[in-house]
């Protein structure tokens, strides 16, 4: 796949697959617009080349009729327009005469955004199933295709792989390029000591990444609920902490195979996730739920991080949605922010934590793609990149 600079873009009608799958609160407001901001470089480059821009993105999963009300991209078009200080025409359709008429009347530097590509999923999963007729239709709307949606590069959908297979002129955008430039060195040639921090809840969707990283890294520091699956696998009491039962066997195998996995030695616990009377304990009792790493663990993890030359971090250290359980994530964030090394955050919840805590600029790279960055670190080639 070419780079965007290798394309002849002047005055062309360009379809950009962006990743505007942004988190929304109960009121439908955007709570983190990082993905929109990260798309501006490619958009501005195309505007400088007098292109007519057609933006496609998904937003969340669309499974039922009600999702049509809560997963519209209208709010995203408005935010993009504010960031660019320029009109962005939102078309509340994914295909049809309204789409075609507006696009055929576009002038140079005009921008249109179609409705959520996954609205097509209500009709037999046409977007997620890479329906050939839909892909061909979307491709017919423009002359050039740019894939700048890193967050969906691990999926072969109609709006990325499908469109690309119908276009001669296509390239990866600046955002995807930046992701590859910062993520590939982590698996290809990390500078040692290389320390991986893993957290969050589930292990099952990270198994291959953990296997691959365990061969490259010097240490894997495990926090979050994920740690309790490993602790249980060691036969340690984990009380009522969240356990990923289907991954217990894998956790046992990993612990037998490698001594690189470093687990918490104390915990912030409670007997009820929602009350505020937490305790700090070295060992959990039967009624306890481990909700954050404790102060001794924070110091232990810092001791592994302090001399590292490469750090990759995926997954919060605790139930960070409740502020009293953010301390572990916050302390590590603050500590890493002061280290002089190659430090990358692998998208998802951790990226939102780092950005919302104000540390984004202190990291070498904060990925916009959770699943995509993990699959890349499995050593896999992603369908959205090898177009
Ligand atoms: P994941 O999607 O697997 O990356 O997990 C992210 C989620 O894990 C976040 O919603 C966190 O609140 C949650 N989480 C992390 N640590 C814990 C914990 N100790 N107990 C419960 N939830 C946790």
Image (cartoon, rainbow, N blue to C red):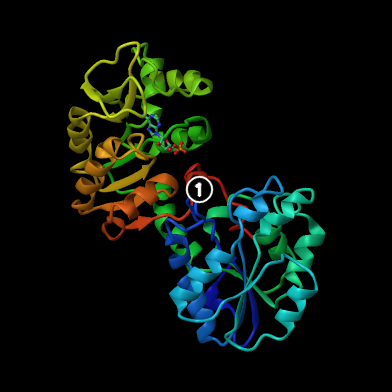
Residue occupying image coordinates x 35% and y 44% = 313
315 to the left or right of 113: left
Residue occupying image coordinates x 52% and y 49% = 372
Can residue 81 be seen here? yes
Figure quadrant of residue 98: bottom right
Residue 83 percent across, percent down from the top left: 44, 74
Callout 1: CB less than 8 Å from ligand 1: no
Residue occupying image coordinates x 33% and y 19% = 271
Residue 208 percent across, percent down from the top left: 51, 35
* Camera-nearest residue between 277 and 38: 277
50 to the left or right of 270: right
377 to the left or right of 18: left
- Pick the quarter of the image with the N terminus: bottom right
* Camera-nearest residue between 264 and 283: 283
Q: Which residue is mark 1?
A: 376
Label 1, residues with CA under 10 Å away: few <14, some 14-19, many ≥20: some
Residue 234 percent across, percent down from the top left: 37, 14
For ligand 1, the image quadrant comes to top left
Tell me: residue 104, above or below residue 272.
below
348 to the left or right of 194: right
* Camera-nearest residue between 69 and 40: 69
Looking at this view, name the residue that lies furthest to the right: 133
Kind of element beneath mark 1:
helix
Can residue 156 be seen here? no
């Amino acid at each position: 796949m070419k780079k965007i600079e290798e394309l002849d873009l002047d005055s062309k009608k360009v379809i950009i697959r962006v990743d505007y799958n942004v988190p929304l609160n109960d009121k439908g407001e955007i709570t983190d617009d990082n993905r929109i901001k990260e798309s501006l470089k490619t958009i501005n480059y195309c505007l400088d080349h007098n292109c007519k821009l057609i933006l496609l993105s998904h937003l969340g999963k669309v499974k039922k009729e009600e999702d049509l009300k809560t997963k519209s991209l209208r709010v995203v078009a408005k935010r993009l327009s504010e960031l660019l200080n320029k009109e962005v025409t939102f078309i509340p359709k994914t295909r049809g005469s309204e789409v075609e008429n507006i696009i055929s009347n576009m002038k140079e530097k005009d921008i249109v955004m179609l409705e959520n590509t996954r609205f097509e999923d209500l009709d037999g999963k046409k977007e997620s199933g890479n329906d050939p007729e839909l892909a061909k239709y979307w491709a017919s709307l423009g002359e050039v295709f740019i894939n700048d949606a890193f967050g969906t590069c691990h999926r072969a959908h109609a709006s990325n792989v499908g469109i690309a297979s119908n276009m001669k002129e296509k390239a990866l955008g600046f955002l995807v390029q930046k992701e590859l430039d910062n993520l590939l060195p982590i698996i290809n040639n990390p500078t040692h000591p290389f320390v991986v921090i893993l957290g969050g809840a589930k292990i099952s969707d990270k198994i291959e990444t953990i296997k691959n990283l365990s061969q490259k890294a010097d240490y894997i520091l495990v926090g979050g609920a994920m740690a309790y699956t490993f602790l249980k696998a060691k036969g340690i009491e984990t009380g009522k902490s969240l356990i990923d039962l289907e991954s217990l066997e894998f956790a046992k195998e990993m612990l037998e195979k490698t001594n690189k996995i470093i687990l918490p030695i104390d915990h912030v616990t409670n007997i009820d996730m929602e009350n505020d009377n937490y305790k700090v304990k070295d060992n959990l009792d039967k009624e306890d739920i481990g909700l954050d790493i404790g102060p001794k663990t924070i110091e232990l993890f810092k001791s592994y991080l302090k001399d590292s030359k490469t750090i990759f971090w995926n997954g919060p250290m605790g139930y960070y949605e409740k502020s009293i359980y953010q301390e572990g994530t916050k302390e590590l964030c603050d500590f890493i922010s002061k280290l002089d090394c190659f430090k990358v955050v692998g998208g998802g919840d951790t990226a939102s934590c780092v950005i919302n805590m104000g540390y984004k600029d202190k990291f070498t790279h904060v990925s916009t793609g959770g699943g995509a960055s993990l699959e890349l670190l499995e050593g896999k080639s992603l369908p959205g990149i090898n177009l």
